[in-house]
Amino acid sequence: MKKLMIAMLALLIVANPAVFAQQKPIKLVFTSVSVPGDAHTQAMYVFKDEVEKLSGGQIQVEVYHSGQLFTQQAEQDAIRKGTIDMVYSSAQWLAEFVPYLSMFGAAYTFQSYSQMTKTFNGPIGQKIFDEIAQKTGIRPLTAYYLGTRQLNLTAKVGPVTKPEQMKSVKLRVPNSPTWIAMGKALGANPTPMAFGEVYMGLKTGAVDGQDNPLPTDKNAKFYEVTKYIVLTDHVVDSTWPTINEKKWKSLTKEQQGWVLAAVNKAREFCDKTNLDNEKNILDFFRSQGLVVIENPDKAAFAAYAKNSYLTESKDISKNWNMELYEEIQKIK
């Protein structure tokens, strides 16, 4: 009898391998260089809790932050190789493979949070994300609001209100062509540097400034080693929770649905947290002794940026999808 039951079980496994494979939890390794206080770091745990709950434990998520596994550049390479399952990516990182995406990392493409989220979290975004998956082997699942990027400068630079005053400023940027072009578009001398090195770079003078959303400036404690915040509003920034495409396709439709529901719950958390933080954060920086320049000449910065992209960074802008760009400008 026992031998008969074993034989029947073996036949069932052969006939229905997927059913038995699902008995072992699916593991998703999600890594980021973001620090614990960042809303998108916290959103990783919202995603983890929600997908584990929705799947009844069928999907398990391991979260690593603060560059515990990889540098920002290395994690982008690792997800394409399938070494890890999920990272935060963005238009700026993926423009190397889908060139027109560089326009989303360009200064002054978006004018508001509403315009950005309606673009990426609607039909246009779905089409873009499908194309990215086809061309790169990794799939953005949605777009979280990272914040609106502002200039953050050391005392050495002095108060800045116009792009001409940025001419000799060593501005830290991530090491990708799109980010470097953005640094030039702000009038600066773009200086590639890993995120984990920025605090010390500002402290030692290796760089004279950096740009990030204000909540990131606070969480990374850049206010300890800088003097000025200039409210240029130059990039309404997003970060995209992204999964390796082979891993994505290995999931059933039901499992994919759980993942999408979880990333969207995490998006709601991340967006609200960053929007709320931005309303109240300037008083904190002032209390730390920083000078907030509230009214820089944004028209001058925007005009300088447009000219920069069309001239010194025309190798970037030549690939922009101007029809799509104009369509996005109609979104409010």
Image (cartoon, rainbow, N blue to C red):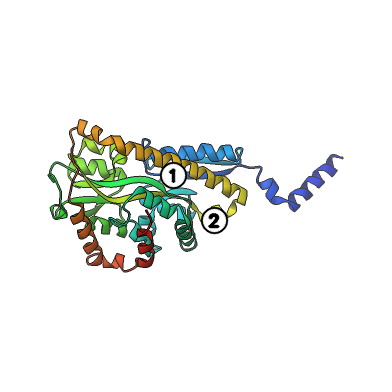
Q: Position of residue 206 (x, y in %)?
A: 19, 47
Q: Is residue 173 visible?
A: yes
Residue nearer the viewer, 266 or 203 = 266
Q: Which mark is residue 246?
A: 2
Specify the quadrant of the image occupied by residue 186. Answer: bottom left
Residue nearer the viewer, 67 or 259 = 259
Residue nearer the viewer, 190 or 102 = 102
Who's the residue at 38% across and 46% down the image? 145
Residue nearer the viewer, 331 or 93 = 331
Who's the residue at 35% across and 59% down the image? 329
Residue 165 appears left or right of 9: left
- The residue most toward the right is 1
Using the image, determine if residue 52 lies above or below residue 129.
above
- What residue sits right under mark 1 in the picture? 31
Q: Position of residue 109 (x, y in %)?
A: 31, 57
Give the total number of marks visible in the rendering: 2
Q: Quadrant of the N terminus?
A: top right
